[in-house]
Image: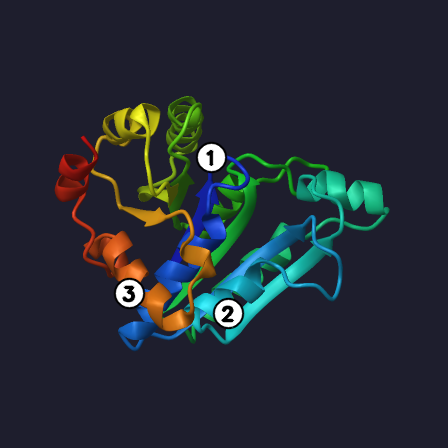
Amino acid sequence: MSILVVTGTDTGVGKTVVTAAVAALARGRGASVAVVKPAQTGVLPGTAGDLDAVIRLGGVTTTFELCRFAEPLSPAAAARVAGVSPVSMVDVVRLVRELRESNRLVLVEGTGGLLERYDEDGATIADLARSLGAQVLVVVGAGGGSVNQTALTLEALAHRGLDLAGLVIGRWPDEPGLVERSNVADLEMLAARPLAGALPERAGRLDRDAFAQVARRGLGPMLGGTFDPAAFRHHVR
């Protein structure tokens, strides 16, 4: 039984699609998978959120969203604006540990970046990963600013003694420019290891079967796929 925390260097880098891809490959191997979203922000009640995308793309049936806030803010700020209690990280830890007993893989998708505040005490997804003893998969951008954001995220991980599962580019463009192509080598240098994957920018629009194929090609063997970082580097030069 394993737990994997999925975080990003920023909002909009493709965390949900990567989470769905990891889940799809695990399910394809016959593993039971649960996905937890501690806090969904920027989405109104009754409308589709990140877990709906994970269900649609990855076919996961065991999902939990603990809190939802309408404003597109950090979970702590969104709860404060709404005048309600923030998500309880104690409850999240308890739920994930319970799910670990009956599922081969439990994925926890964070909101925003690694150090987004979840409550007024400053709890973050990094704190959650440490409490769970979980590895952290970091979803990164490919364009301008991504190298700096990744460096800061990895530094924060290392400072907290957290184990990096790998870097995945969540939205690789169909026509990468010089910045995107150059950043690949820098991202691998920062991580001190090859990329763990790169998914195309429109992968989230595919149907489930096509998405499963893209996920297999876009994620490395550690995540259940066939992505070859050396071949990817050669292709983008």
Tell me the number on the disc at residue 55.
2
Name the outermost residue toward the right.
Answer: 83
Can see residue 1?
no
Instruction: Give the camera-side residue of 56 and 98.
Output: 56
112 to 46, vertically: above or below: above
The 10 Å Cα crowd at callout 2, few under 14, some 14 to 19, many 20 or more, is some
User: What coloring was used for the rendering?
Assistant: rainbow
Secondary structure beneath label 1: loop
Instruction: Give the camera-side residue of 146 and 189.
Output: 146
x then y, percent, for residue 73:
70, 39
**Lower sequence index among marks 3 and 2:** 2
Tell me the number on the disc at residue 9.
1
**Residue 190 is drawn in which quadrant?**
top left
Q: Is residue 29 left or right of residue 77?
A: left
Q: Which amino acid type is marked by label 1? A: Thr
Instruction: Give the camera-side residue of 90 and 59.
Output: 59
Residue placed at 77% from the left, 46% from the top? 79
> Badge 3 is on which residue?
213
Q: Answer whether labels 3 and 1 touch (C-beta < 8 Å).
A: no
Q: Quadrant where the C terminus lies?
A: top left
Can see residue 167?
yes
Instruction: Give the camera-side residue of 197 and 125.
Output: 197
Q: Quadrant where the N terminus lies?
A: bottom left
Q: Which amino acid type is marked by label 2? A: Ile
Residue placed at 70% from the left, 63% from the top? 47
3D distance between C-alphas at marks 2 and 1: 23 Å
The 10 Å Cα crowd at callout 3, few under 14, some 14 to 19, many 20 or more, is some
Q: Which amino acid type is marked by label 3? A: Gln
Q: Is residue 110 left or right of residue 65?
A: left
Secondary structure beneath label 2: helix
**Lower sequence index among marks 3 and 1:** 1
3D distance between C-alphas at marks 3 and 2: 16 Å
